[in-house]
Image (tube, grey):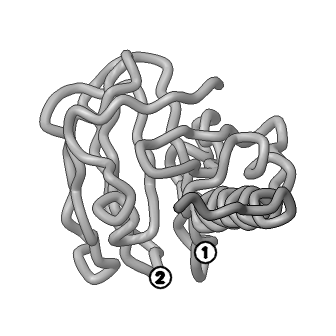
Amino acid sequence: MKKKTNFSSHIFTIIIGVLGLVALVFYLSSNNSLPTLEQYLSKNTISAKETLIHAPNGFIKAELATSSEQLETGLSGRQSLDPGSGMLFVFPVVASRGFWMRNMSFPIDIIWIDKNKTVIGVTKDVDPASYPNIFFPPQPVKYVLELNAGYAEENGIASGTPLTFTI
């Protein structure tokens, strides 16, 4: 014997299915831990002295160090660095650059970057107490990025990682 179903029960089932699908899409999109570029820029402004670096697991707002004074001073004298931010040193020529922790108040990761914007090395968790030790890249670099200690590992930045940014 064939059971009759009414039209309203089919509509009710379809509506419940659509609502479930909408809820699932909303849940998945709201739990995405990585912001899109548009989301990041809507919450953060980038000045002419900064750049936005696209790394594997998100974005880094980096202050640019380009003048002789900025290249020498870097983050020295600062008490902290905001989460998700850093300082990008831009050198005029590719060379082996030495970095030290003089007048630093917090540990950092030093990211060594070649002229093609590929990470060629990471010196992790460099402590201010390491001064006067000098840290060098594994090969000559065009850029160096300083980040809060632990940020590189937490965000997938390692040797071979391509980074995207404009100067």
Q: Which residue is drawn at 22% across and 56% down?
A: 123
Nearer the observer, 19 or 54:
19
Q: Type of residue at label 2? A: Ser
Q: Quadrant of residue 146?
A: bottom left
Drawn side of residue 93 relative to residue 80, left or right:
left
Q: Residue at x 19, y 65 (%)?
A: 133
Q: Quadrant of residue 78?
A: bottom right
Q: Name the residue under label 2.
A: 105
Q: Name the residue under label 1.
A: 78
**Residue 11 visible:** yes
Residue 22, horizontal then vertical, whole percent:
73, 58
Q: Do the residues labelled 1 and 2 touch (CB within 8 Å)?
A: yes
Residue 39, horizontal then vertical, whole percent:
77, 50
Against 35, residue 137 (above or below) is above
Residue 137, horizontal then vertical, whole percent:
20, 40
Mark closer to the chain start, 1 or 2: 1
Drawn side of residue 121 relative to residue 142, left or right:
left
